[in-house]
Image (spheres, rainbow, N blue to C red):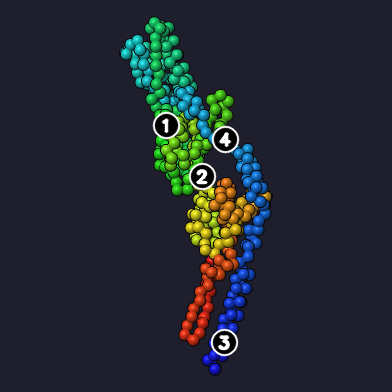
Amino acid sequence: MQIMKKCIQRFFCLAGLLHLLLALLLQGCGSDPRFKETVSIEEFKKQSVEQVAEVKESNVPLTSSMPEDVSVSGDYLLGEGDLISIQVFETEELNTEVRVSSTGVINAPLLGDVNVLNLSAAEAEKKIEKLYAKDYLHNPHVAVHIKEHVSKQITLLGAIKTPGTYNYVSRRRILDILAMGNGLTEKAGSFCYITRQDPKTGSRVSYMVDLDELMKKGDVESNHTILGGDVIYIPESGQCFVDGAVRKPGTYPISNNMSVSEAIALAGGLASYADDDSIKLVRYMGKGKERQVVSISYNQLQAGVGDTLFLQDQDIIFAESSASGKLMAGSGLTIGFMGTGVSFRDPEN
């Protein structure tokens, strides 16, 4: 009889303990007040587009791709240190290779000093032809080839292993220039920006090149020619923070057009106790503005709705915990001889 009473007492004690445990668990599993939803998905998308537009307006004019006539321009202007070859078709004795002096002068056979400073190869050809035609040859034909481009330099900045200024020795393309700087760092972003002087307007213009298309997908059309005087800047990739009910919370680099579901995948996926209907995306909207919080369900992510929200630098993804999921993931039942016990481990700890 005494044994039966003890069993009944233990049963009610266990029931009370379970009730108390469940109440405490439910109390601690509400939505995180820091990430209360402030905006709908539609409004969030609209604000994101406006934010990107503001950033673009505040920077140097940016084109999505380099126009081909600029990329392969032959209007390189001769300057100090450039090495050129001169070919006179009427007589081989006048052929020569000569370097432009510090004053912009070359020494050509029979002609002596000829000023070619800031002339293109085509302009130098015409000038030399006229000089030979004046006193030495009838209707001469001259070809000038630039063998080394030294007068103009290129500058590598940003997430490059060896940034600095380099001599532009010969016509190079983007991959050649990145190799000169010993390649990209691990933090390099998906794009590089090439700033050069527009020969028509004289203003500085920036062109954006997709490095993922070039280096990972082998898009040779993106491997544009670099000109003397170009500045190549490779920004570091942005970062997002994934927290809450995920397997590996932490900070992760943002790749090109990275979606919410891709970031969650990097964090090991949702934990078993996650609330599938409450995944929060938190975005910093700029100095002096309140951050915006949008709530997305896992079903929306699977349907591709949330994946049209590409991540930006400093974005936070927070997966809420569900009470039932947390209880199932953290509770355990222990049965012993003539007695019963219960244990609970918070799966988030």
Q: CA distance from mark 4 to mark 2?
A: 17 Å
Other residues around mark 3 within 10 Å, as few (<14) / some (14–19) / many (≥20): few
- For the residue pair 179 and 311, the one nearer the viewer reads as 311
In front: label 4 or label 3: 3
146 up-or-down from 178: above or below: above
User: Is residue 166 in view from this perspective?
Assistant: no
Q: Residue at x 56, y 55 (%)?
A: 298
Q: Are marks 2 and 3 in contact (CB under 8 Å)?
A: no
**Distance from label 1 to label 2 (Cα)?**
26 Å
Q: Amino acid at mark 1?
A: Arg
For label 3, the SS is: helix
Q: Which mark identifies residue 62?
A: 4
Mark 2 neighbour density, 10 Å: few (under 14) some (14–19) many (20 or more): some
Amino acid type, residue under disc 2 in the picture: Asn
Q: Is any part of residue 333 visible from this angle?
A: yes
Q: Which residue is mark 1?
A: 172
Q: Position of residue 76 (x, y in %)?
A: 47, 24
**Front residue (pair 228, 343):** 343
How far across and down, in percent of the image, does residue 264 sit? 52, 55
Residue 325 picture quarter: bottom right
Number of the label disc, if any, that sits on residue 8: 3
Mark 3 or mark 1, earlier in chain: 3
Pointer 1 local density, CA inside 10 Å: few below 14, some 14–19, many at least 20: some
- The answer to whether mark 4 and mark 3 are in CB contact below 8 A is no
Tell me the mark number nearer the camera, choosing from 1 and 2.
Answer: 2
Select label 2 or label 3 by which is in front.
Answer: 3
Q: Residue at x 46, y 20 (%)?
A: 120
At 57% across and 87% down in the image, what residue appears? Answer: 8
CA–CA distance in space, label 3 to label 1:
86 Å
Q: Earlier in the sequence, mark 4 or mark 2?
A: 4
Q: Which mark is residue 256?
A: 2
